[in-house]
Image: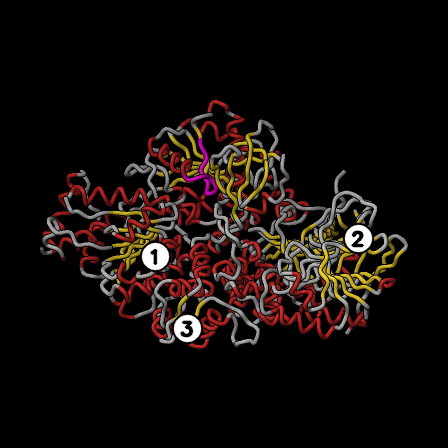
Amino acid sequence: MNTAIQTQELRIHAQDFILHPSGAVYWPAQKMLLIADVHLGKITHFRKHGSAVPETAILENFERLDAVVQYFAPAEICFLGDLFHSHLNTEWELFATWVAQTQLPIVLVAGNHDIIHPQRYEKLGIVVVAEKQCGSFLLAHHPIAERTALFRICGHIHPGIRLSGLGKQQLRVPCFYKQVHQLILPAFGTFTGKHLITPQDTDQVYAVTSEEVIPIRYS
Amino acid sequence: MNRAALFSIAHQWFETQSWKPFPFQKQTWTAFLQGKHGLLNAPTGSGKTYALWVPIVLDYIQKNPDYATRHKKGLKAIWITPLRALSVEIKQAAERFVAEIDVPLTVGIRTGDTSQKERAAQKRKMPDLLITTPESLQLLLASKGYDTVFKDVSAIVIDEWHELVGSKRGVQIELALSRLKTLAPAMRIWGISATIGNLAQARDVLLGVAPETSANAVFIKAHLQKKIKVRSIIPDQMETFPWRGHLGLHLLPQVIPIIQQSTTTLLFTNTRAQCEIWFQKLLEHHPDFAGSIAMHHGSINKETRLWVEQAIREGSLTAVVCTSSLDLGVDFAPVETIIQIGGPKGVARFLQRAGRSGHQPGKESVIYFLPTHAIELVEAAALQKAVKTQTIEDRIPYLNSYDVLVQYLTTLAVSNGFYPEKIYAEVKGTYCFQTITPEQFQWILNFLTLGSQSLQQYDEYKKVVIQEDGRYTVESRAVAMRHRLQIGTIVSDAVLTVKYLKGGFLGSIEEWFVSKLKPGDVFTFAGRNLELFRIKNMQVLVKKSHQKKAKVPSWMGGRMSFSSEMSALLREELYAVAAGSTKVSKELKALTHIFQRQQRESVVPSPQEFLIETFKTREGYHAIFYPFEGRFVHEALGSLLAYRISLLLPITFSIAFNDYGFELLSDQQIDMQQVLDNDLLTTQDLKSDLQKSLNATEMARRKFRDIAVIAGLVFTGYPNKMLKSKHLQSSSQLLFDVFKDYEPDNLLYQQAFVETFEHQLEEGRLQLAMERIATQTIVWKACKKPTPFSFPIITDRLREKLSSEKLADRIKRMTAQLEKA
């Protein structure tokens, strides 16, 4: 199934990173898989409040997680915030089962949606931190506007890009958004929206489809 | 009291007003007192209120001979109006009659504008006549003990039924009526409708499919033909008149003298944006108008609208620029002149607008038609004919609107709860749901109670629960509250309120427009230039701005299609030109130079010809097709053809359409000979190809937005109310995708496609159009540049997309725009 997957390599601060179509980033030197904005529990949250989102879609996030873990075989997973959409609900049990099966060290950089008590994560063996520094890199949830000494890898905004072409063609697709000082990951979760960005010429944008990561040219 | 005695009460009152009852009024009185249901076909300003209110009162007198001394408590009649603005007018008329004949009946209004306090008071003591809207009636059904409120109702009148019959609000009424019929068996059902093409069907929709109801029903027509004169405003210099555009400002100088010549002029525009711009430009061009002209559209706050309406009645305004917001109801006697800016798209609407002027008996109504671009003059000529021949279109009722049914059943579950077997029989008696099967109804019940069709292990779905006695109820207070808030939501984009920073409500505006603005940007709203300060809690906070240049919000909607009747008339006009007829109208004569240029660069098609033009610009390869069948048919045909071509090769199209034709634009050249050789315009496999093309375009996706809101799948929030619903916000677009991938057999998801089919694409019309085209000779012109006919189409920015290419391949050919430095 993974044979058609086309990733994209990116070199930042003398380190290699691999961008995956799912929206995850693999950091080979650290054997670390970075994933932002899964928003687990969102569908259940909606259903609990009377909005009948198809429940079969719930499993999709876990299938995608399994697929990308299998693809890179990382030694560690770091979630860059908004792992769980809202309050505790039954999807937590699915998540707990998934964590147990995965058997990998997991770190959660807490995001604004992560309102579940850290102790619950810790019971599953997950370390919850506000942010995490690795060498000259800072793993965080929120992007920032100004440059800092550390290169930031983060999520939160669910970046997407508007593309146009000949024949009045227009598209909006989720993307990786690399600025001089930070890399913003697209939302990993299904049933999440996107926020359109407007890049500057010093930025790089990589659109993602279900199978490919595609560098974007500017007009 | 016998009928003659009762009638004499009414006659005497009419005499004191120096009026004489019209035959249709007397017919309605008789039929009502005989206990019949019915549909009354009468225009606005004809005395239709007294046609029905009088017999309701007489019936009360008859049944309560001691009416003068003993008042029987409780609700006796309901009057439904689609526009709450009309309720005051109706109340005044109703009160006048009962006050002057000394019958102590009270009249109350209950709409979205009614205060909480008044609602509570009404609950304790209902007025005798309740004037309300379809939404507020649903809300009454959502309150506990509604059955006792309605049990003694003797009549329900649905006013302006023609406005409701082709909408989902009409379905809301059908369902409410199905409940009331059971609760109040003595209730008579009456509709009042302006003339539409399908009046007989409109009556069936109102009364439902139960034979005993229709057997006891009448149809009454008011024969009050008014003379209507249509005058086109023709540009002095046709050569400089634009080929496209939709504002019509070029002709503004010619409008000024028309306004000056009459007491009050109403200028009807097609969109709120156009309304704002015309108001501004009229003032700029003729500053003397300041203070004596006003603006009226649906986004302006209620106080201002009511003030404008009152000022029209008093004759203190010279001109009012308005939208369809002034289409309905109330009489404006001082209005002398109507100007329609741009095509009204429908004969019924045009006639209704024309009828807003010249109310004095025997007086002729004059309506000016102001074309916004050259080709629209053809429309003017067609309208003239339509008015003469009274060619009026149908309003197509909705069938199987599961979203409204989901909403309705939740409503019943919120209040008293319901037993499915009983409600199923009632629902099946409506016109809308006459074909619903027990399986489909069970699907809806499962959807409400399980959120799906089977019970899943981890599920926490909560909405409607089944009690031990089999009653379906809502237990969660949060669910009930959200549902009540949602009932009133008009299906439109998320709407934000516009307010001054210092306080003061200006109106409401669609979210998508505001989302394009940054703080500091200036935009025009309610006739003022405003600077955006910030957006917070569904409120747009603004300051006054003196900056001259401003953005004008372009509201969604307002894009209507020609009816098939209008399209046929339009074709006749064009063919007359092609045939070189000398009898062409002055509108078409004015267009001579454009037709000459079209003839030179391409051809003006004859009735036997179907024109296709191809040319290349720097935008790409254009192919234009001219069926002259109206926007909706073109939308369908454009999608169908694009789909069929996309089967031949991987290709991406941008499709544009107007009432004259449609365009397929691509970055690749289309081999037109191949299209013709493959007979891609065939009616063979029409239905399945059209269905597949729907999947490939975004049309159904857009329809789904309304469905998701009505069925309570997405919660839109509510202006001015801060609700902790942030984690429940989602776009219907996301939801559509999830259904597509995981539950494609969901009835609500399916409904989006059916509705697109029946209401947008009008498959039946498409079939007829294609059969007509099949008899024509195809004339393919490879042109050097855009032709006069093509111009309005290729410059249209509202487009449909269709692609058979791999997403990644498309992305690789496209680029992103950089931030402007």
Q: Are marks 1 and 2 on the same chain?
A: no
**Label 2 crowd (10 A; few <14 / some 14-19 / many >=20):** some
- Please give the residue where the numbered disc 1 appears in the rendered image: B140
Viewer-proximal residue among B162 and B673: B162
Q: In which image quadrant can residue B629 be found?
A: bottom right
Instruction: Say which of marks 3 and 2 sits in front.
Output: 2
Whether residue A59 appears in this view of the structure is: yes
Q: In which image quadrant can residue B204 be found?
A: bottom left
Question: Residue at 44% across / 32% down in the picture?
Answer: B294
Viewer-proximal residue among B305 and A185: A185
User: For the N terminus of chain B, which image quadrant?
Assistant: bottom left
Instruction: Say which of marks 1 and 3 sits in front.
Output: 3
What's the distance in space between the residues labelled 1 and 2, CA to CA? 57 Å
**Label 1 crowd (10 A; few <14 / some 14-19 / many >=20):** many
What's the distance in space between the residues labelled 1 and 3, CA to CA? 22 Å
Using the image, tell me which numbered label, if any, was put on residue A138: 2
Indicate yes or no whether the magenta region holds residue B301.
yes
Give percent across and percent down for residue B708: 52, 60
Secondary element type, mark 3: strand
Residue type (three-letter) at the residue carrying disc 3:
Ile
Q: In which image quadrant can residue B819 be found?
A: top right
**In the visual, does B393 lie left or right of B579?**
left
- Please give the residue where the numbered disc 3 appears in the rendered image: B466
CB contact under 8 Å: marks 1 and 3: no
**In the visual, does A72 lie left or right of A98?**
right
Residue type (three-letter) at the residue carrying disc 2:
Leu
Give percent across and percent down for residue B430: 36, 67
Viewer-proximal residue among A146 and A63: A146
Q: Are marks 3 and 2 on the same chain?
A: no
The stretch in magenta equals: B294-302
**Comes first in the chain, label 1 or label 3:** 1
Residue type (three-letter) at the residue carrying disc 1:
Leu
